[in-house]
Image (tube, grey):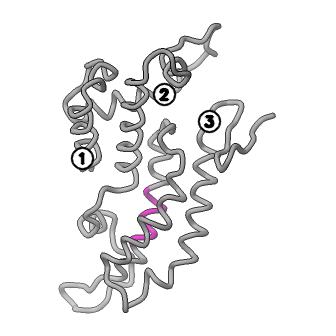
Amino acid sequence: MEDFRYLVTTLTNQNSIQEDIKSRLKSGNICYHSVQNLLSSILLSKNLKIKVYRTIALPFVLYGCETWSLTLREEHRLMVFENRVLRRIFGPKRDEVTADWRKLHVHNEELNDLYCSPNIVQVIKSKRMRWAGHVARMGDRRGVYRVLVGKPDGKRPLGRPRRKWDDNIKIDLQEVGCGGMDWMELAQDRDRWWALMNAVMNLRVP
């Protein structure tokens, strides 16, 4: 089979997450459309609308995200979804010069300033690091740990190698000043790992 559904996750014979993210975004959009009247209601505060988004719509998109190896393309698709929801929440913006309501949508940079919580990509990075810490501390008796450290037989296909899952962990640690360090050794210190995980989640990347 080229692909099949396990629970609500789409698995492919090429180990690609593109179809899974596509399916997750579809579910997130369905959930978003079911609550969009609440998100645009003048009777609810902005903070309450954000809570509705983060507790109802966002979990649909992020199911199983701990195992994702994201590229910039997938990160962009996820940010497009979240920005669309945030524009519904914050609504149009009044022009400071003319005092008229702006016809165009709020710019992405303005959304970053208005939305104080970690964005969807930062949440994924945090969840991925938390899961990585659990796996690194499991020990070699657990199957998940053996899958992480195992080396498959055979030769990889020609061409540029695909980004591996733990490459994302190394990139995230590099962004918070821990590049070049053995992340599995770092993860053995639970308190330090949680501090790094929070640093990655709160990192503002332009």
* Residue at the far right in the pictured view: 1
> Percent x, y for residue 195?
21, 39
* Disc sitting over residue 203 in the figure: 1
Q: Please tell me whether mark 2 or mark 1 is closer to you in this view.
A: 1
Q: Which residue has dot 2 on it? A: 163
Q: Which residue has dot 3 on it? A: 16
Dot 3 falls on a residue whose secondary structure is loop
Q: Relative to residue 105, is residue 18 drawn left or right? A: right
Location of residue 39 with respect to 179 vertically, above or below:
below
Looking at the rendering, the stretch of residues picked out in magenta corresponds to: 79-86
> Percent x, y for residue 175?
25, 35
Q: Residue at x 36, y 86 (%)?
A: 44
Dot 1 falls on a residue whose secondary structure is loop
Q: Nearer the viewer, residue 82 or 127?
A: 127
Location of residue 166 with respect to 71 vertically, above or below:
above
Q: Are marks 3 and 2 in contact (CB under 8 Å)?
A: no
Give, as a three-letter code, the residue at label 3.
Answer: Ser
Residues packed near mark 3 inside 10 Å, few (<14), some (14 to 19) or many (20 plus): some
- Is 164 colored magenta in this rendering? no
SS majority, magenta? helix
Alpha carbon of mark 2 to alpha carbon of mark 1: how far? 22 Å
Give, as a three-letter code, the residue at label 2.
Answer: Arg
Of labels 2 and 1, earlier in sequence is 2
